[in-house]
Image (cartoon, grey):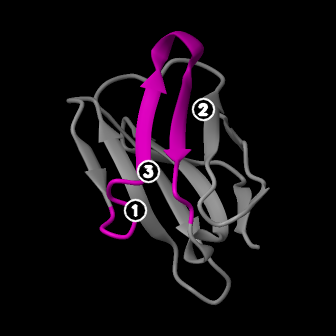
Amino acid sequence: QVQVVESGGDLVQPGGSLRLSCATNGSIDSPYLLAWYRQAPGQERERVAALNSGHKLVYADSVQGRFTISRDPAKNTMYLQMNSLKLEDTALYYCNIFSRGVNYWGQGTQVTVSS
C-alpha cells in the first residue's frame, strides 16, 4: 500500500513562490503517472501538472510557464515548484500517483495566495 503525504502549502502574496512536496513510503514501480491536482472551493478538481515514467511533462494552460513538476527517486518524493503565484492559484493541492492500475491520493496541502 502506497502512502502519500503532501506538504509545503502556505499563505503567500501574489507574485510569490512555493514548493510543494509529495513524499511516499516507498519507491514507485514503472510505468507510473505522477500528478498534482488542485481544488478550489465550489470548483471541480483539476490537474495542473503531470509527469509519467517516460519523463513526459504536461501542464494545464493556467500554470504553464509558472509551475514545474519534478521527482527525486532517491528521496521517494515529487515536487511542484510554483512561481509567480496568482490569487486564482488558491486551492487545496493534492498529489496523485497512478501505478499498477491503482490511484493513490494524499490528504492535500492548502495554498492561499492573498495580499
In the drawing, does residue 107 fall left or right of residue 17?
right
Q: Position of residue 14 (x, y in %)?
A: 64, 66
- Quadrant assignment for the C terminus: bottom right
Q: Which of marks 3 and 2 is in front?
A: 3
Q: Nearer the viewer, residue 85 or 37?
A: 85
Q: Report crowding for label 1: few under 14, some 14 to 19, many 20 or more residues within 10 A (C-alpha).
A: some
Vertical side of 58 occupied by 15: above or below: below
User: Of label 3 and label 2, which has the lower sequence position?
Assistant: 2
Residue at (37, 70) in percent of width and height: 62
**Residue corresponding to mark 2:** 2
Q: Where is residue 27 in the image (x, y as percent from the top left)?
A: 51, 18
Location of residue 52 by image quarter: top left
- Element class at badge 2: loop
**Residue corresponding to mark 3:** 67
User: Of label 2 and label 1, which has the lower sequence position?
Assistant: 2
Disc 2/disc 1 C-alpha distance (Å): 28 Å
Amino acid type shown at disc 1: Val
Q: Where is residue 5 in the image (x, y as percent from the top left)?
A: 70, 39
Q: Which of 5 and 60 is in front in this view?
A: 60
Q: What residue range appears in magenta?
A: 60-85
In the drawing, does residue 102 fall left or right of residue 55?
right
Location of residue 32 by image quarter: top left
**Residue corresponding to mark 1:** 63
